[in-house]
Amino acid sequence: MTTTRRRFLFLFPAYAASTQHLRSPFHKKKPLPPAPPRVYIGTDTARGVSKGIYQANFNSSTGQLSVPVLAAQTLRPSYLALSPLRAGKRSLFAVNAVPDPSATVTTFDLDTATGILTEKSKVTSAGAGPAYISVDSTGHAAFVANYFGGTIASYVIQPDGSLSQPVDTFDYKDPKFGHHGPVPVRQDGPHPHSVFVSPDDRFLIVNDLGNDALSVFRIDPGTAKLTPSDPLLTSLRPGSGPRHIAFHPNGRWVYLINELDSTLDHLLWTTTHSVTHSQAFLVNTNSPVKTIAQGFPADKNTAAEVMISPDGNFLYASNRGEDTLVVFSIAEKGTLKEVQRISCGGKTPRHFTFDPTFNWILCGNQDSASITVFRRDQGTGKLAGPAQTVPVDSPLFTLFA
């Protein structure tokens, strides 16, 4: 049959439509870009404006943070932690940092598809003023430091993602944990400020701001029970006020930020490999480095957060009072050298965090009601910005999830 030009033009659209399913298997649709990572923000509800945990989206390509919206109403969620993903589900834990012995830790179900938080349960924090919560990488155990109560507690994470009642508690008023430091206003007693799980999940390191000491416990991975290591304590300079630590990627160096004298200490981490009686201890290299600029009044500043880049080349610290972020390079032997000092873009930078690409840092400025976003050069470690300032009342903690 002869097909005329007119007949071909008439039949071609129908033919083309009928062959859509015969396209080459190599012709694929472009994949959708990944959803912007979610950021959860714990806030200070005691000031009467914020209501709890807020949620925003962050675009790691542009460095833009969306306007935070309330995700869950809860009392003073000053520190947050996530459980590992289990069967498509995660739990988000928040300490409710009220200065009362009835303080709690709240568990939320986190819907990984929508980001919605649903309150699941509350348990006692086993002390007043819980300031820190950490979770081991297996998602079997959690640990809490109670700043005002002077206690720490351990928990089992149950199959439904909620916390058990406390498994172990330790009261730091016991003399074996040392004696309070020489700053009466801040060191009137023990003040455990953080509980940090070692990279191998075998040990818990406690920073006690009130007693100027770090203590180490062995973790039972099945029960979350804690056993004091031997030696138990690493004593620090009187009046230093240890707050938080960060492990170097090599697993041997630990960097401690001291709140009261605004310093960083480099410590060496050593463990034994015994399965039944493993021990660990910290040795201070006695090479403190100031976080504040020379000449800035030490009594006008409290150092806050410390973090290390994943390549191990740079350390970042924040100063409340000087209101700065400081970048240090980490030399071959672990010594620190200041690279940059930059304004935090607000007031009282209590906490900051890297985004998942490590190209950006989000800094929560507690007393200027804002989060500032800084671009990070991975080659030099330096920060540029702030590239954006987002209003949110009294941010205490930021967590990517």
Image (spheres, rainbow, N blue to C red):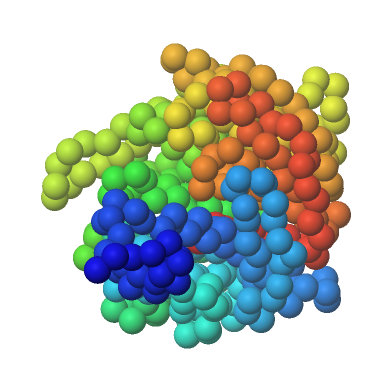
Figure check: 29 above or below 98: above
Q: Nearer the viewer, residue 362 or 95?
A: 362
**Image coords of residue 395 (percent x, y):** 73, 60
Q: Quadrant of residue 131?
A: bottom right
Q: Quadrant of residue 294?
A: top right
| Residue displayed at 86% across by 54% down | 368
Q: Is 101 positioned to the left or the right of 3 in the image? A: right
Q: Quadrant of residue 54?
A: bottom right
**Image coords of residue 312 (percent x, y):** 46, 28
* Residue furthest to the top: 332
Figure check: 246 above or below 31: above
Evaluate whether residue 388 shows in this view: yes
Q: Is 136 positioned to the left or the right of 345 in the image? A: left
Q: Nearer the viewer, residue 270 or 160?
A: 160
Evaluate whether residue 134 shows in this view: no
**How many discs mark residues in the rendered view?**
0
| Residue displayed at 75% across by 27% down | 341
| Residue displayed at 22% across by 65% down | 222
Which image quarter holds the N terminus?
Answer: bottom left
Q: Is 44 positioned to the left or the right of 295 in the image? A: left
**Image coords of residue 295 (percent x, y):** 85, 22
**Image coords of residue 215 (percent x, y):** 43, 46
| Residue displayed at 64% across by 68% down | 55
Q: Nearer the viewer, residue 52 or 75?
A: 52
Figure check: 45 above or below 294: below
Q: Nearer the viewer, residue 41 or 338?
A: 41
